[in-house]
Amino acid sequence: MNNISPKDLKDWIDSSKDHDIIDVREPWEREVGYIDGSEHIVMNLLTTSLDKIRKDCDVVVYCRSGARSAAVAHHLETQLGYTNIHNLEGGITAWAEQVDPNCEVA
């Protein structure tokens, strides 16, 4: 599994690099705040939403702190054959601290 720092993800967003961002948190967490442009796929519904996870570009998954998204990234790679998955280091908490101080975190 690859990790990506919040600042590197911001660089990807700013450079228009082809990528997807997936928020695996619970709906109530997302209501508080999220990374703009991210798709919401609740962690326990992942296997029913695989059609939303592309294999032809880099995909960044995130949660609050990086633990749940690391588990999702590991599952996508080891069980489902994805090779393009990146876990956001520190999750949305690190994103809010390092990149977007206006992003609220539940």
Image (cartoon, rainbow, N blue to C red):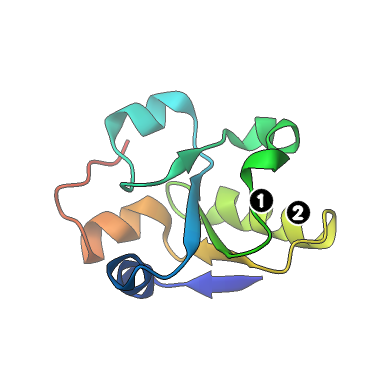
Q: Secondary structure at mark 2?
A: helix
- Between 54 and 42, the residue placed more toward the observer is 54
Question: Which residue appears at 14% of the width and 48% of the height?
Answer: 102
Q: Position of residue 46 (x, y in %)?
A: 68, 37
**Which corner quadrant of the image does residue 95 belong to?**
bottom left
Identified at 24% across, 66% down, the residue is 98
Residue 47 in the image: state x and y as whole percent: 75, 37
> How many labels were placed on the picture?
2
Looking at the image, is 103 positioned above or below residue 77?
above
State whether residue 30 is above or below residue 36: above
The quadrant of the picture occupied by the C terminus is: top left
- Kindly identify the residue that appears in the image at 33 percent across and 48 percent down: 35
Residue where numbered disc 2 is placed: 75
Q: Residue at x 15, y 54 (%)?
A: 101
In the depicted view, which residue is nearer to us: 75 or 11? 11
Vertical position of residue 74 compared to residue 7: above or below: above
Task: Decide which of 103, 37 is in the foreground and name it.
Answer: 37
Look at label 2 and name its amino acid.
Answer: His
Image-based side of 100 in relation to 51, left or right: left
Q: Which residue is mark 1?
A: 72
Do residues under tags 1 and 2 come within 8 Å of each other at their CB atoms?
Answer: yes
The quadrant where residue 42 appears: top right
Circle 1: element type: helix
Q: Left or right: 70 with respect to 11? A: right
x and y percentages locating residue 10 in the rendered image = 31, 67
Q: CA distance from mark 1 to mark 2?
A: 5 Å
